[in-house]
């Protein structure tokens, strides 16, 4: 339960673009190439935003894991 709350808070702190890409990747199971196409973004930009989101979420969850 604590991890779920931290996850919600960490996603809320992310920039909107990073959060959207993270949600599509984690919850919808989409690949980066599919996300890039869906959001009309260059592949590298989608990949970089996903990396930023993952890093931020990991930092927030580090104390719980």
Image (cartoon, rainbow, N blue to C red):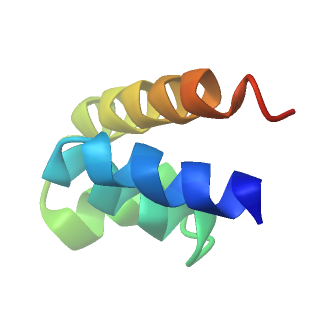
Q: Is residue 42 left or right of residue 30?
A: left
Residue at 18% in and 42% down: 15
Residue 23 in percent (x, y) is at: 45, 65
In this rendering, would 6 be left or right of 51? right
| Quarter of the picture holding the C terminus | top right
| Quadrant of res 61 | top right
Q: Is residue 11 left or right of residue 64?
A: left
In the displayed structure, would residue 14 be above or below residue 27?
above
Residue most toward the bottom? Answer: 28
**Vertical comparison of 12 with 38: above or below:** above
Q: Position of residue 33 (x, y in %)?
A: 43, 54
Residue 25 to residue 55: above or below: below
Q: How many marks?
A: 0
Position of 58 compared to 8: left or right?
right
Compare residues 49 and 10 and report the one nearer the observer. 10
At x 54%, y 35%, the residue is: 57
Q: Position of residue 44 (x, y in %)?
A: 30, 29
The residue lying at 56 percent from left, 30 percent from top is 60
Quadrant hosting residue 64 = top right
* Quarter location, residue 37: bottom left
Quadrant including the N terminus: bottom right
Q: Position of residue 59 (x, y in %)?
A: 58, 21
The front one of 21 and 9 is 9
Farthest-out residue, right? 65
């Amino acid at each position: 339960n604590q991890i779920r709350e931290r996850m919600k808070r960490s996603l809320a702190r992310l920039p909107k673009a990073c959060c959207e890409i993270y949600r599509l990747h984690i919850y919808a199971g989409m690949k980066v190439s599919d996300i890039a196409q869906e959001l009309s973004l260059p592949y590298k930009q989608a990949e970089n935003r996903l990396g930023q989101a993952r890093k931020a979420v990991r930092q927030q969850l580090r104390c719980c894991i």
